[in-house]
Image (cartoon, rainbow, N blue to C red):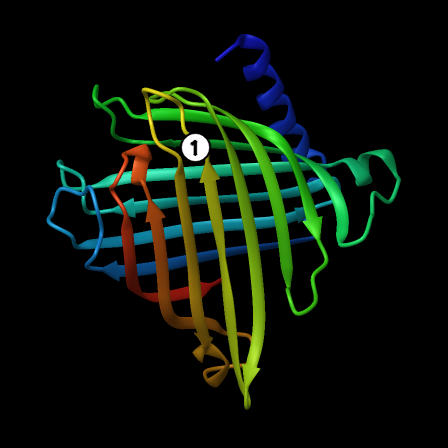
């Protein structure tokens, strides 16, 4: 990765994260997952995952980060994380950058990292590009981010990420469907094009404990074509889910 790209990524991350000391809102959650249909793991096809997530809305952008801790590595455990600060061009310029369903335009960055790799030292990928927030009927939120990726273990490529959340009710019960879709380009002689579409279907059982308790039960459905860029390694997995928001 070029020094100028590292500097730009760090600057944008710092600007988006720290320009507003007190978030407008923030959310922290812990999720537990268990599934039995995973590909390219050490312990047959079973996997248990604990995910820590943090999301915040800031005056000049937003921030999202998560860390997955799984038990499927050759050494018994594996950690993967992403940190994704975005800088709102509308908020910085003081102009409304709205057009049709577009609510805002943002500079989007992501730092991906974790344990693993042939040398056992882990990896770091840096993504940078442009994002848009969308206003879509019935959606709580929706965004599209387009990135250029500087990858540690593969040739550099391009990635599109869609993020969405749709709340709904069945009678008096509250449900939420949310998730993401990552699609990345192929690089000849190095890796195939990937598509990872992961959706969580959740029921808020916590409201039966207290009005402010957000405890979800449900499932996560993950469809991952050419996992890790390996042609023909396709994953179609449904995992049991429990999630608690603090």
Residue lying farthest to the top in this orientation: 3
Instruction: Report the residue at 64% width, 64% height from top.
Output: 140
* Residue at image coords 60%, 40%: 145
The crowd level at tag 1 (other Cα within 10 Å; few <14, some 14-19, many 20+) is many
In the image, residue 32 lies at what x, y percent? Answer: 32, 60
In the rendered image, which residue does mark 1 sit on? Answer: 112
In the rendered structure, the answer to whether residue 51 lies left or right of residue 108 reads left
Expressed as whole percent of the image width and height from the top left, the position of residue 9 reads 58, 23
Q: Element at badge 1?
A: strand
Residue closest to the far left: 44
71 lies above or below 82: below
Q: For residue 7, what is the image quadrant?
A: top right
Image side of residue 92 versus residue 57, left or right: right
Give the residue displayed 43% in from the left and 32% down from the top: 112
Above or below for 246 versus 41: below
In this rendering, the answer to whether 90 lies above or below 133 is above
Query: Residue 204, position in %: x, y?
Result: 47, 76
């Amino acid at each position: 990765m070029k020094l100028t790209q590292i500097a730009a990524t760090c600057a944008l991350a710092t600007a988006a994260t720290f320009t507003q000391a007190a978030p407008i809102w923030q959310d922290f959650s812990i999720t537990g997952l268990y599934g039995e249909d995973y590909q390219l793991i050490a312990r047959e096809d079973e996997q248990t995952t604990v995910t820590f997530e943090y999301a915040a809305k800031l005056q000049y952008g937003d921030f999202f980060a998560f860390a997955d801790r799984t038990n499927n590595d050759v050494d018994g455990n594996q950690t993967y994380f992403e940190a994704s600060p975005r800088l709102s061009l509308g908020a910085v310029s003081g102009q409304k950058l709205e057009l049709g369903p577009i609510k805002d335009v943002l500079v989007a960055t992501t730092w991906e990292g974790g344990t693993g790799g042939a040398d056992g030292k882990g990896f770091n990928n840096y993504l940078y590009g442009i994002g848009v927030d969308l206003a879509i009927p019935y959606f709580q939120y929706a965004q599209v981010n387009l990135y250029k990726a500087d990858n540690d273990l593969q040739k550099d490529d391009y990635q599109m990420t869609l993020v969405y959340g749709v709340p709904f009710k069945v009678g008096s019960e509250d449900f939420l469907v949310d998730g993401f879709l990552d699609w990345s380009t192929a690089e000849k002689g190095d890796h195939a094009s990937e598509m990872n579409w992961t959706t969580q279907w959740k029921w808020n059982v916590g409201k039966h404990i207290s009005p402010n308790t957000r405890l979800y039960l449900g499932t996560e459905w993950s469809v991952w074509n050419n996992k890790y860029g390996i042609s023909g390694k396709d994953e179609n997995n449904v995992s049991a889910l429990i999630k608690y928001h603090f």
